[in-house]
Image (spheres, grey):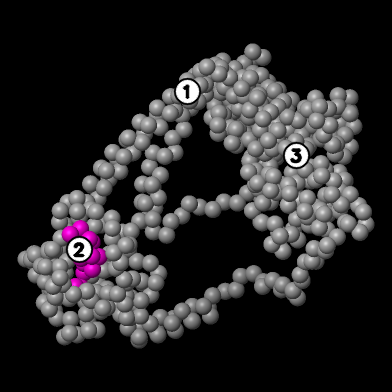
Amino acid sequence: MTSVRIKVGEKIQEMPIDMLRPSPENELIYRPVLKDDEDIRALSESILRVGRVCEPLIISMDGWILSGHRRRIAAQLAGLETVPCLVAAIRREDDLDRWSRLIRECNEQRHKNYAVLLREQVLTSDPEEVYQALIEHRRAKAAKPDFGDVIDLGPVKKRKVISPAKKPMLDAIQQILRELKPFWPLSDRRIHYNLLNLRPLRHASKRRFYRNDPESYKDLTDLLTRARVAGVIPFEAIGDETRPFVQWDAHPDPRSFIRHEIDQLLKGYTRDLQQSQPNWIEIVGEKMTLKSIIEPISMRYCVPYTLGRGFSSLAPRHDMLHRFRRSGREKLVILIMSDLDPAGMTIAESFARSMRDDFQLHDDQIRARKVALTHDQVRERQIPHGEKATAKRAATRKEFIRRYGQFVYELEALSPDELQALLQRAIDDELDVEMFNKEIDAEKRDATFLDVVRRKLLLSIQEQSNEL
């Protein structure tokens, strides 16, 4: 589309606000200018501080506004009686089609959403150009190669309705979800072990109670799926940490990004509460499902953590060594959380041994502790056992049976509260509590200082933006 040009006078005139007439075409193309709009109020406050409108409005010779509808409203809110104006050599009534095009030209640099752009096109587009573009699009689409086969979805298949016979088991699941809501999303295994404490009927008419066996677990996963699809339990209550999801922190436009950044300015501070400790403490979790349990405690103490999926590769261990050496501390303390099974036993011992042997640390430079799950915890709490111990290496299985017996036990058998309490107690045992409390007091002072700095920076940013 060709530009529409108009001569604008060079002399700025102060015009009474009441004499300026908003153009109806502006409201048709753009959204109405409302006095309670957040941007309008912000602009009004800026005008009030400066005492004037910095950028002149553009008006026609008969007093219609071409550019400046938002500035006019903001100036009114600020209590101004006149605003600076430049007069364009045109009268609105002379050529309404040309006037609509000028409205768009004068607003070319303003922020516009999709609806605004659409209305611009409707009122100012050339029908011949639009139709030709449509024809070109059809040609391009027809020439585009077809990649891949369309999947035939077949007939609709609905899942089985949850029968009344499943109500005792469903009620027990809902009870667990209510009690463990702070730890959402929960894994299927977490719900499984909580059901072992309640032992509901799997099927009311068949009098089958929930047990620690593959059949019960299969019933659980099936019921969880059907209950979520049916809307009986919320989707967000159940998670699968083995399939991570990534979404980019995107914004609809620069203004949204700027507002977000200003709102978060200097709000993400965390003091290194471990900086005065003699030892460098790290947490290692065997599986991703421990994230919701470990992270709150890790954050509270400012202690780093590493999660794995079974045996850890060399890279995470090397990264841990780098953090330890960079800290300059006397000793590396590793707090490990893993199942009580052959793999969990080996993970805990091999991780610590590798940190010492592969990276040439001395015995007095490293200490590893199994926080959970230990054999004493299993006996004290009478935790239900899982299946019989298995391992790829016969020697590993034999050693596990020699130490702990033939059955295995999973971390999920302990409640999230218990696991967090065990982890917190282990960290407390390793801390110089007096120094830690001093760091907390210092963080409170830091927060006050940062609040003052943030207020000053926001004021400076607002003053600078008024000059742009």
The secondary element bearing badge 1 is classed as helix
- Report whether 159 appears left or right of 274: right
Q: Nearer the viewer, residue 417 or 327?
A: 417
* Residue type, mark 2 in image: Gln
Q: Of the residues under marks 3 and 1, which one precedes in the sequence?
A: 3
Q: Nearer the observer, disc 3 or disc 2?
A: 2
* In the foreground, 420 or 346: 420
Whether residue 373 can be seen here: yes
Q: In the drawing, does residue 289 fall left or right of residue 266?
A: right
Residue at 74% of width from left, 59% of height from top? 227
Verify CB contact (< 8 Å) between mark 1 and mark 2: no
Seen at 25% across and 57% down, the residue is 43
Q: Amino acid at mark 3?
A: Glu
Residue 132 lies, with reference to residue 168, above or below; the image says below
Residue type (three-letter) at the residue carrying disc 1: Glu
Which element carries disc 2, helix, strand or loop? helix
Closer to the camera in the image, 392 or 168: 168
Q: Earlier in the sequence, mark 1 or mark 2?
A: 2
Is 176 above or below relative to 15?
Answer: above
Residue at (29% x, 64% y) in the render = 35
* Residue 15, horizontal then vertical, whole percent: 10, 67
* Residue 3 visible within the image: no
SS majority, magenta = helix
Residue 399, horizontal then vertical, whole percent: 86, 26
Residue for badge 3? 412
Query: Mark 1 — residue?
Result: 439
- Mark 3 nearby-residue class (10 Å; few <14, some 14–19, many ≥20): many
Q: Which residue is mark 2?
A: 76
* Quadrant the N terminus occupies: bottom left
